[in-house]
Image (tube, grey):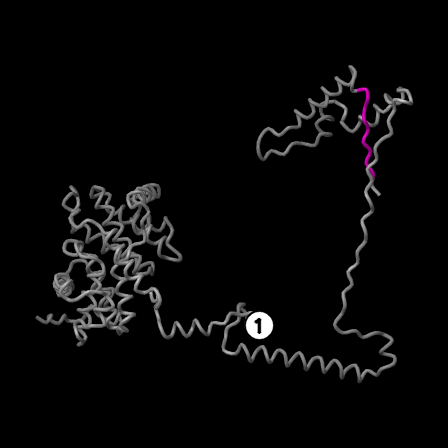
Amino acid sequence: MASFQIHEDQENRGIGGRRLKKQVSNVSLESKRTALGVISLPTNNINAQKGKQPLQSLGGENACLKSKLPFHQRKAPVKVREDPPQKTTLELKPSLKVSVASTSTRSTASLKSEIDVIGKEKNVFEDQILSTSKGEEPMSEGEQYSPMRIDKSLDNAVEKSKPDCLFYVEEYKHEIHMHLRQIEVVRRPKAGYMKKQPDINFSMRSILVDWLVEVTEEYKMDPETLYLAVSYIDRFLSFMSVVKANLQLVGTAAMFIAAKYEEIYPPELSEFVYLTDDTYSKAQVLKMENLMLKVLCFDLSVPTALCFIKKYCLETQATDNVKSLAMYLSELTLLEGDPFLKFLPSEIACSAIAIARHNFGMKLWDEELELTTGYVVDEFKTCLTCLHETFTKAPKYPQKAVYDKYKVAKWHSVSLLTPLPLPC
């Protein structure tokens, strides 16, 4: 049983009391923390080091001052008592009780039979769990099946029926498409920005984009990251003049931003510095990233041509050959900024799909595509002609990164195809 005694010292009213108050105030000031995170020493240790009496001695040695007071002026100490803590016991009830007395009355054979019945019931319960969860993977990494699992049957059915369904939502697909068509107009670069650049030209831009294609292939990035990086570069150069020595720095910062926006595991900053052969330091890349984000006003969500190609191919159930060739053609437009900056990404996507369909023996454009895209052939006919010319000249380009990328079997070797002439 713990008890605490609180005494009221009457001598504090006199001269001795003022001395004691001053002593207590000095102790409190000395024991005060000087800075955040600095833990002060206990009060007893501070007083002991300076030769002062601790505060606890006020009720001990100074208690003799109370004995000199008259009896009628003395006050009984106030006692605060704590009740002893009550002991609480927790009884655990076993699921199977086998007492010593029962063993004397019942035979061991009867006990074994009861245990066997319990074991059989347990096996039946486990068999029911395994039968209900057959064909599913457990949540844990082990091989044991667990009743705590997620039913993915509906998700698997959706994935099988609509693969790659990034923008496919039946109830809102029209609104999503209209929103993308509006945003592509607002966040598009200026078509003639290169005329105001004193030190760079479109040829230098093509070399930079070709290098970015190699970077995305080296680090296995998503193709959308490349499109976003090129969009950031064009939008940045539409407002800022850049010298030739800093053009690669602009491309590095744009790819760094796009990777952090699109990739799950983007490359580190040191990797981008290494790709530039240590031409730029980490501080320079971060400074350019900061400037680019301010110029772009942090508007990084941009619908690209690849975005529209995926959406149109999904809704029209295009074949893999058509989709691969359309992606190859749209990626060729990234190299040539001169004719293709004046076209919207949706127009480039429609032109790429139309040429891909025509090259594989299908109709150039049909009513289903008109309903899906909202375009007729006459609306993107100029872009269609320019893209077909680029498709014809692609094998002779000095920048071979895109051509070599789509030459492999993964993309059905679409870059090796011979372009068919467009119908009149």
Q: Identify residue for label 1.
A: 147
Q: Quadrant of residue 322?
A: bottom left
Q: Nearer the viewer, residue 61 or 158?
A: 158
Q: Secondary structure at mark 1?
A: loop
Residue 265 in the image: above or below residue 149:
above
Q: Residues within 10 Å of mark 1 (few under 14, many from 20)?
A: few
Q: Is residue 409 left or right of residue 140?
A: left
Q: Residue at x 69, y 80 (%)?
A: 119
Q: Quadrant of the N terminus?
A: top right
Q: Quadrant of residue 158?
A: bottom left
Residue 413 in the image: above or below residue 257:
below
Q: Is residue 408 left or right of residue 43?
A: left
Q: Quadrant of the C terminus?
A: bottom left
Q: Nearer the viewer, residue 403 or 179?
A: 179
**Residue 396 visible in the shown view:** no
**Residue 132 visible in the shown view:** yes
Q: Residue at x 17, y 76 (%)?
A: 361
Which residue range is magenta in the image? 3-11
Q: Is residue 159 left or right of residue 130?
A: left
Looking at the image, which residue sits at the far left? 424
Q: Position of residue 300 (x, y in %)?
A: 32, 51
Residue 360 in the image: above or below residue 257:
below
Kind of residue at disc 1: Pro
Q: Is residue 6 magenta?
A: yes
Q: Residue at x 19, y 49 (%)?
A: 190
Q: Position of residue 88 (x, y in %)?
A: 79, 56
Q: Position of residue 68 (x, y in %)?
A: 89, 19
